[in-house]
Image (cartoon, rainbow, N blue to C red):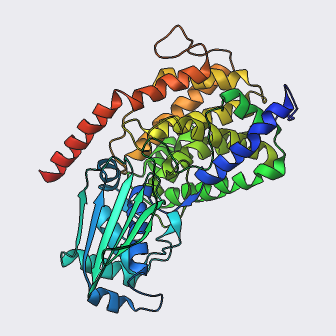
Amino acid sequence: MSSINPTSSGNQTEYNSQWAVYLRAIHHEVLPALGCTEPISLALASAIAGSYLFDDTTPISTKLGQITSINGKVSANLMKNGMGVSVPGTGMVGLPIAAAVGALGGDPKGGLEVLKGLNDEIVTAGKYLLETNRVNVAIKPVANILYSEVTIVASEDSVTVAIADSHTQVIKIEKNKEVLFELKLDETIDNTAPYCLREATVKSIYEFAHNVPFEQIEFILQAEALNNALSEEGMKHNYGLHIGRTLKAQIETGLLSDDLLSNILIRSTAASDARMGGATLPAMSNSGSGNQGISATMPVVVVADHLKATAEQRARALILSHLIAVYIHSKLPKLSAMCAVSTAAMGSAAGMAWLLGKGEYQPISLALSSMVGDIAGIICDGASNSCAMKVSTSASSAFKAVLMAISSSGVTGNEGIVSHDVDQSIENLCSLARGSMQQTDVQIIEIMVKKDNC
């Protein structure tokens, strides 16, 4: 590919003052995750509760004999995102099986990889708990958009663990009605992130990604390794809707061209197929979502492969993509009616524009604005196999916006919710999720619950 040489520009001291913030944001929000993070959050609460009832040497048969009930209570949004998604290694969908196997064999210190150690014995025992009606999960009316709580009763003991505001943040542990741990949260302030992106801009993020020493961001290449492995797995088997495999097959029939866009769609969607279809491989997540991590990673990787980019060029494009995705998501509710795969793909648009636009800023700004003008308002109707469809749609929009941008074309501030300033365009988009789409979210959940009860 053409040489892209990072160069210092502008006030370097000013940009350096943000670098530590940006690095903290990436390290906090870009993490390996096994399975959809909403049921995984409930599984983590269950695993932690179980650790206060049993030790590491307790046989599964003993746990199965002593557990009399597992009661999960979750926020409406977590229910929406957990009720129809596969739980890795179980062959089942939904929150109850996540709570069951979490209690029996989850790693209480595993974070988003809490179910990494599942085996057949644990899964069989978990299914038996469901068959014997010992697991129940219901909606709890709480102010927290992201909330999961599990109470396990075993023999004479009862333990309750609650997680709120992020997928792994424990806010309460209670055993036999005695509070062992409690985290006080100011309901008006988000205390879950050790960083603040209020001063961030697309331009400053670009300057960071373009100039930060390579050795400080080389770690982001793990996102390529993990999500590419998921993509390869999705191409081997019929996970979920197997969209990636279907598109690949249509190239062979002549109905689809074997070109860069097709490869972006196939490889990105295959990763989501595998993740949502229950593959036992971790995704590198972004902002608490594996699909967001896939959307921020795979289109950039495919373009980097096409251009034969160096490791440093890949790392800079990926750090730009993931940080733009985190920046946009920081303006959204933790879970909302707006599909965050679409906003994560805006990150990949930035990364692809950096690669194809020879490291210039203007194509990045144009591509982001065009995406706001293109796919604003894609709804999130819960985590499911169909999320891979949204990954495909968002990746297509991103590449289209990039092709326009490198030709100096894009949606302008004269059109719709797009402003002349890219950061204001992003703010306009996110304000919809914080405002009018709150009611949309309520109606989506009502429809899903009613349908599920039919």
Q: Quadrant of residue 8?
A: top right
Q: Where is residue 197 in the image (x, y as percent from the top left)?
A: 62, 37
Q: Is residue 439 left or right of residue 290?
A: left
Can residue 259 be seen in the rendering of this structure?
A: no
Q: In which quarter of the image is residue 124?
A: bottom left
**Farthest residue, direction left:** 454
Q: Nearest the camera: 204 or 358?
A: 204
Q: Position of residue 192 (x, y in %)?
A: 53, 51
Q: Position of residue 170 (x, y in %)?
A: 46, 63
Q: Nearest the camera: 57 or 176?
A: 176
How many marks overall?
A: 0
Q: Position of residue 411 (x, y in %)?
A: 56, 15
Vertical arrangement, residue 53 with respect to residue 216, above or below: below
Residue shown at 40%/86% (left/top)? 54
Q: Nearest the camera: 228 or 6?
A: 6
* Location of the N terminus (image quadrant): top right
**Farthest residue, direction top:** 414
Vertical arrangement, residue 2 with respect to residue 425, above or below: below
Q: Nearest the camera: 298 or 133?
A: 133
Residue shown at 49%/46% (left/top)? 269
Residue shown at 30%/86% (left/top)? 64
Can residue 304 be seen in the rendering of this structure?
A: yes
